[in-house]
Image (tube, coloured by chain):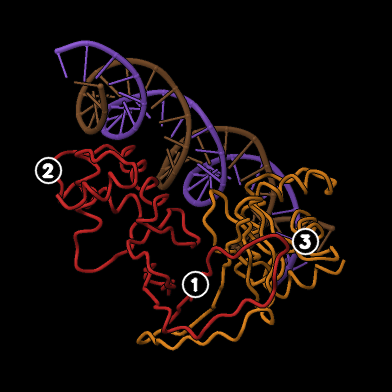
Chain colours: A red, B orange, C brown, D purple
Amino acid sequence: MKYIEKLRNSGLRPTKQRLQICEVLFNSEKTFHFTINELDQKIKKQASDKISLATIYNTVHAFEKKGYLKQIPINSNQTYFDTNISDHHHFYDLKEEKLIDLENADVGPINILKKINGKKIKSVEVLVKLED
Amino acid sequence: MKYIEKLRNSGLRPTKQRLQICEVLFNSEKTFHFTINELDQKIKKQASDKISLATIYNTVHAFEKKGYLKQIPINSNQTYFDTNISDHHHFYDLKEEKLIDLENADVGPINILKKINGKKIKSVEVLVKLED
DNA sequence: TCAGTAGTTTATAATGATTCTAAAAAGGTG
DNA sequence: CACCTTTTTAGAATCATTATAAACTACTGA
């Protein structure tokens, strides 16, 4: 299996559950956005075995910490994650409550002029809210 | 009272509670960021009467809808609001878990090149995460 | 002024996402 | 296989937020 190596290399044991979650998350043509709840539904459909919700939470957080997933900063009652870990941004369609990727190239270069003493910039994320 | 007019003009009855919340939110030299919980604490100290948590939620949402407050898109278990309603952005200090204003002038002009069919851009918000 | 009404406040319950717990199960190593 | 550590799990706990429904209050017009 192609994910065993990946997990081992990051110090995560390649358990049956993690491998199945990998399949659902990373074995698709396109990257996508999801909430834990949506992922849970998707796993119910695609995975052969039942995976407990706690495990899904654990795994998603583990993957995020390892950099295989990104959290998307947005105000929602649920946390959104992205399987697209490239440096990019998002539209948020307020009506549909849907996220749309916004590639770096589709945003002019961003230059943060203000510096904060003793702090480094870790990331710059742009959220573009859309209305009709 | 200077807030009575403001509330009436936006179709909100100037109740005792709302006026007191206005004092806490808008009667200060500097703008600030807060969570509902922090606001509740602040009201407990500054306001003469007790205001129920439900009212604080209601009022903050009403003010946000009227444009007197802005929600800050950030991943946190609590929702952050800003009394600074000018068009601006934020640093988020991951270690201190503190927000810092980032004025528009301190970010180069942002040009969103990608257009979404039938949708207008309502806002463009930049979140700059800081680490040590 | 007063009654009617629509809007507000309130305490409390309900909801729902997320985290915690502690016991069982599984992976890895020798 | 035996051992130890990590992981999974069901269910409980937590906690921010929203809903409820009854009491209250601001405004309107007679």
Q: Which mark is residue A127?
A: 1
Label 2 marks a residue whose chain is: A
Secondary structure of the residue carrying tag 2 is loop
**Circle 3/circle 1 CB separation < 8 Å:** no
| Number of callouts | 3
Where, by quadrant of the figure, is residue A51 drawn? Answer: top left
Residue B86 seen in the figure: no
User: Which amino acid type corresponds to the residue marked 2 in the rendered image?
Assistant: Ser
Q: Is residue C30 above or below residue A3?
A: above
Q: Residue at coordinates 70% horizontally, 48% vertically from top-left? A: B38
Q: Is residue D2 above or below residue C17?
A: above
Look at discs 3 and 1 and give the one toward the viewer. 1
User: Which amino acid type corresponds to the residue marked 1 in the rendered image?
Assistant: Leu
Q: Is residue C14 above or below residue A73?
A: above
Q: CA distance from mark 3 to mark 2?
A: 55 Å
**Circle 3/circle 2 CB separation < 8 Å:** no
Q: Depth check: A76 or B103 in front?
A: B103
Q: CA distance from mark 3 to mark 1?
A: 29 Å
The residue tagged 3 is B22
**Circle 2/circle 1 CB separation < 8 Å:** no
The quadrant in which the N terminus of chain B is found is bottom right
Q: Residue at coordinates 73% horizontally, 71% vertically from top-left? A: B8
The residue tagged 2 is A48
Secondary structure of the residue carrying tag 1 is strand
* Residue A68: % across, % down: 35, 56
Outermost residue toward the left?
Answer: A48
